[in-house]
Image: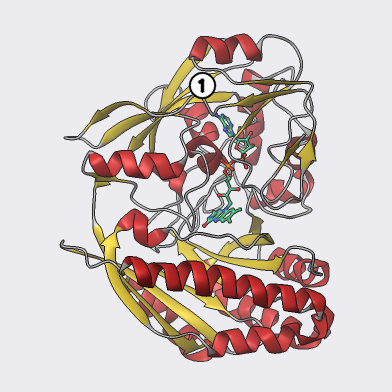
Amino acid sequence: MWTNWARTASCTPTRVVHPSSTDEIAAAVVSGGRVRARGSGHSFNDIAVAPEVALDLDRWTGIVRADTETGLVTVRSGTPLRVLNADLHRLGLAMPNLGDIDAQTVAGAVSTSTHGTGAKLGVLATAIAGLELVLADGSVVTCSRSERPDLFNAARVGLGALGIISTITLQCVPSFVLHASEAPGRLDAVLEQFDDLCAVEDHVEFHWFTHSDRVILKRNNRIPEPAEPLSRARQLWEYEVMENAAFGAVCKVAKAFPRYTRKLNEVCGSLISERSYSDYSHNVFVTPRRVRFVETEFSIPRETLMDVIAELRAVANRLGDRDALIVPCEVRVAQADDIWLSTASGRDTAYISMHQALGMQYKAFFDAYASIAASVGGRPHWGKMHDLTAEQLRPLYPHFDDFLRVRDEVDPGRTFTNPYLDRVLG
Ligand SMILES: Cc1cc2nc3c(=O)[nH]c(=O)nc-3n(C[C@H](O)[C@H](O)[C@H](O)COP(=O)(O)OP(=O)(O)OC[C@H]3O[C@@H](n4cnc5c(N)ncnc54)[C@H](O)[C@@H]3O)c2cc1C
């Protein structure tokens, strides 16, 4: 039985295949039955569920070719981001932007529109220069801006609905050092300067302790080398002890005594201290996440961020102690792009993600957030918890029907569908 990281989705496929070549991927695709590729199971919903044939790409990893002059790197789709980042670094290259963790596979990450933060940077899939896919009939095709552009626009964020991505060609950048600055702050003060910060900082985000006005403001900016990383001892203390072990203990207390969740959330916010360091980008973007949680996230038009936060504040005050969230919410931004189902498609975007420790109540807050997001045209993260259907999603994406047209062309028999795709694509 397969279960995702958050333990919110599981399935027992009739067959699990571990291909180690494009031919083996193609053979599995045409062998009969519905087929889903698996990433590393880090989506919070059932998008990766494979009721029939599951393609586990754990033997389909590594860089195929790299041009250090142009930065174009072709990678096998099952490569974990952690491995990709290390391999790129050895070549003097890096991904232009990353999310909070590196456990995802490269294909899994781009397929759900995974993103980091940066008002002048796009979601991870915007780094894709070309794709090789195995289609439902077993054919192997390539696409890029100039070759089969419709397939390219659909498949960069393809939800696993169009075919199995076998390789991805990424436009990487020379490796770079980030200066990281993390500081406690107050929500109103941060909101007041947020637009200005987005304009001048390379990467800016804040974590809001939802039942208080406390935030951690994180700013990461590119600087010339050398890096001055946190010492091993400090990394161990800050990441493993404080952010994981101690925070895990706080979550356990909140789970055992939910009436104290609100208070604990506020106390955690008051204990934040400043830290600054510099390191190679992948070491700054990514931190270990060992405390398991559930998560929902909507992308909203950037200009609606203040209104949405104000409404979430009202919800946080209104809901009872048992519905309070122990994990802070995270606010990030991304630049508009031209990928049909990217959550930043056609609009500069702010992301607000709400989390709750596993085993605690989250539905009242998540549902309230979903209706607030709906009122401003919020688009759910494809890999996080939400209840939207194709009818509700169509008006949110100008190219939704273009995506369905390409899907009809390349997978008329719905080889690659599953219950999640039936819901979100119809
Ligand atoms: C702790 C944690 C932190 C996270 N942080 C962030 C973050 O900072 N930013 C963010 O945006 N998201 C974040 N996420 C969400 C995560 O990035 C996405 O859900 C991502 O899709 C997970 O990748 P995966 O490899 O686990 O793929 P899976 O969840 O296993 O699969 C996702 C989708 O990709 C498809 N897929 C996988 N491989 C292929 C292939 N070869 N061809 C075609 N389709 C394929 C699957 O069929 C499925 O549809 C986080 C999740 C967790 C658990």
| Residue 305, quarter of picture | bottom right
Instruction: Pinpoint residue 24: horizontal percent, then vertical percent.
Output: 56, 11
Q: Quadrant of the N terminus?
A: top right
Front-most of residues 350 and 47: 47
| Residue 312, quarter of picture | bottom right
Instruction: Pinpoint residue 88: horizontal percent, then vertical percent.
Output: 29, 40
Q: Which residue is drawn at 73% across and 28% down?
A: 417
Instruction: Pinpoint residue 92: horizontal percent, then vertical percent.
Output: 21, 43
Front-most of residues 413 and 262: 262
Q: Residues within 10 Å of mark 1 (few under 14, many from 20)?
A: many
Answer yes or no: disc 1 within 8 Å of ligand 1: yes
Instruction: Pinpoint residue 348: horizontal percent, then vertical percent.
Output: 47, 61
Front-most of residues 177 and 358: 358
Q: What colour scheme was applied to this rendering of the protein? A: secondary structure
Residue 204 visible, this angle:
yes
Ligand 1, by image quadrant, is top right
> Which residue, given by chain and number where applicable, does mark 1 sit on?
133
Image side of residue 365 versus residue 119, left or right: right
Q: In which quarter of the image is the C terminus?
A: top right
Image side of residue 395 versus residue 65, left or right: right
Residue 172 visible, this angle:
no
Q: Which residue is drawn at 79% across and 35% down?
A: 11
